[in-house]
Amino acid sequence: MVDRNGWGGDRPVLTGSRRSPPPSFVEQANVTDSGIYDEFEANWPNCWERAADLLSWNQPYETVLEDEDAPFYRWFAGGRLNAAENCVDRHLEAGRKTHTAIRWEGKHGDRKTYTYRDLYVAINEFAAALRNLGVEEDDVVTIYLPMIPELPIAMLACARIGAPHSVVFAGLSADALATRMDAADSEFLVTCDGYYRRGDAFNQKSKADNARLKLAQDVRTVVVDRLGEDLPHVLGDDEFDYHDLRDRFAGETVDPVPRDAEDMLFLMYTSGTTGEPKGVVHTTGGYLSHVAWTSHAVLDVKPEDTYWCAADIGWITGHSYIVYGPLALGTTTVMYEGTPDYPDRDRLWEIVDRNAVDIFYTAPTAIRAFMKWGEDYPERHDLSSLRLLGSVGEPISPRPWNWYYEHVGNGECPVVDTWWQTETGAVTISTLPGIDEMKPGAAGPGLPGIDVRVVDESGAEVEPGESGYLTIARPWPGMVRTLYDGDDRFRTEYWNQFSDPDRGEWWYASGDAARVDEDGYITVLGRVDDVINVSGRRLSTMEIESAITGVEGVAEAAVVGRSSEANGTDVQAYVSTERGYDDQGEVRGAIIDSIEAAIGPIARPADVLFTPELPKTRSGKIMRRLLEDVANDEDLGDTSALRNPEIVGEIQAEIRGE
Ligand code: PRX
């Protein structure tokens, strides 16, 4: 059994009744020929030209795939293109200047619309400003902005001048920002004074200031004034006001820099199995082809659609499916600054209704919340504009799936349950909505051209119905190319476990457990490494543990995932204190503060349990696996081989509240 997060293991995972794609959807779908699976198989890897053909290239590529130096694959080698030109300029040239590119829904009813022409102007002016600040091709620009239009503008301005961006989620702490800027040697930062969340103003600049103090390098910083009078701020040395810069460079244009297909488009830090976040490197040609293709084939995006992915651009979902995918296809992408329940729990449905949204893409954690709040909220609004629904980030079980299908989609919209990761860049497992039957609880088969295998420890494929490790046995265009911190870590994290280089087999280890059914549909069970997925956000247990053990008085700590109705998984911390630190309230407070300072509020534990000792093997290793079973109230089996078996019963009683 390889399921460590309590997502199934030996328990049966129920898949609901199958559903066929609604005929009204099929009639108009972008992809309807079921022969596409065989066609991709027969022509692999050249089948991926279909994805590359969705883009405009300054120079055609020479080969589709170069695999001589596996696992360092090269896609569309020799080709040159610019991502910003693909996402903006070419739509102007196609006569779509006045078409809405970004529809921004801000807090308290603030709204902004950017046509493709507006976006073009903003990106050019900001690109000119960045150049003037000294940003050169290949310099990493860190962007630390919340969900405001300046975030995609800054990303695309970077892309225009060939400077890779590294977006750091706005809710992460100063320490987390500093770690990422240091790891990327980034000397440029785009941030803001603050932002609103629910009615409150958050100070972002003070976090950015604190991060800069920790860095050895000088950092030139651009500050977007988001809050105005609500949060006055002063600019220090090397700090520049975004709007002043835009005024200074008003009307300027900057030629898009043709980038090699394999040049880095961006870096995205994500949690790994050690305390150090991994800098996932995505390149220009493969990534953009893959996100454009999946936006077309899986999300069924058409240029005339109003499309809404309700994620945050600070994570990969927003990069691929708020910014690059939809804009590459020239559609209208909705960007929402707020939360789903503010000012009321019908906020999202009000936005769908008012904008006549065609496609809506969100995470299971949100869907579970909608279900809990009840169908009255969606029923208050006309949602008949919707054509397709998507889910991403965590497993979605049949009940919320069906609820979404019935109460949001009115039984008329296919639901695509899309499995992918920061490292895959774009969707890799999903049904094709105009072709495939849906099975609630199973994401679907690998997309055409994606060779997904579920294997045991030895790398042998498991029988249908059994759980195993989710691997991908062939490269794909959107895949991570390496880790910014080094090629060695790239090999050990993803390739060493299941590859057989002597036989030329390179199998990517996803870190997830899954099972496959007789039709090849994959049910994802959860992470099998030291990563936990809380509300669709990846956290490293090691990173949280090191924040806890840094607190004065803490002797040892272990962090595990605990199944949660609302969040999928919650963070459960076990802590033992040194002698003399008996005030648990005080230590608990210090632990929470330390985690928030090291990572951010998203990593706050649902529970901190104090115990005199942690269960250990005779060699002194903390038994995290056992602690996870305790947290999930699982059967523990034989614990007699432990050095301190008696402690397990005590912890169990405490968890059960006995
Ligand atoms: O465990 C899987 C889960 O999210 C992880 C990837 O997290 P991240 O890199 O932050 O990217 C999230 C958005 C793509 C995976 O290893 N995951 C993602 N999508 C699904 C999922 N688990 C089950 N079903 C999904 N559809």
Image (cartoon, rainbow, N blue to C red):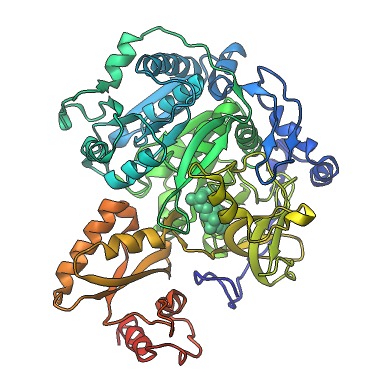
Q: Is residue 387 left or right of residue 32?
A: left
Q: Is residue 382 visible?
A: no
Quadrant of the snapshot with the N terminus: bottom right
Q: Quadrant of residue 11?
A: bottom right
Q: Position of residue 325 (x, y in %)?
A: 57, 33
Q: How many marks do you count on the picture?
A: 0
Front residue of 278/215: it is 215
428, above or below 543, in the image: above
| Residue in the image at 37% along x and 15% along y | 129
Front residue of 165/535: it is 165
Q: In this view, which residue lies farthest toward the top?
A: 251
| Residue in the image at 72% along x and 45% along y | 23
Q: Is residue 163 visible?
A: yes
Q: Is residue 233 left or right of residue 438?
A: left
Q: Quadrant of residue 245?
A: top left
| Residue in the image at 68% along x and 40% along y | 73
75, above or below 579, in the image: above
Q: Position of residue 576 (x, y in %)?
A: 27, 76
Q: Quadrant of residue 148?
A: top left
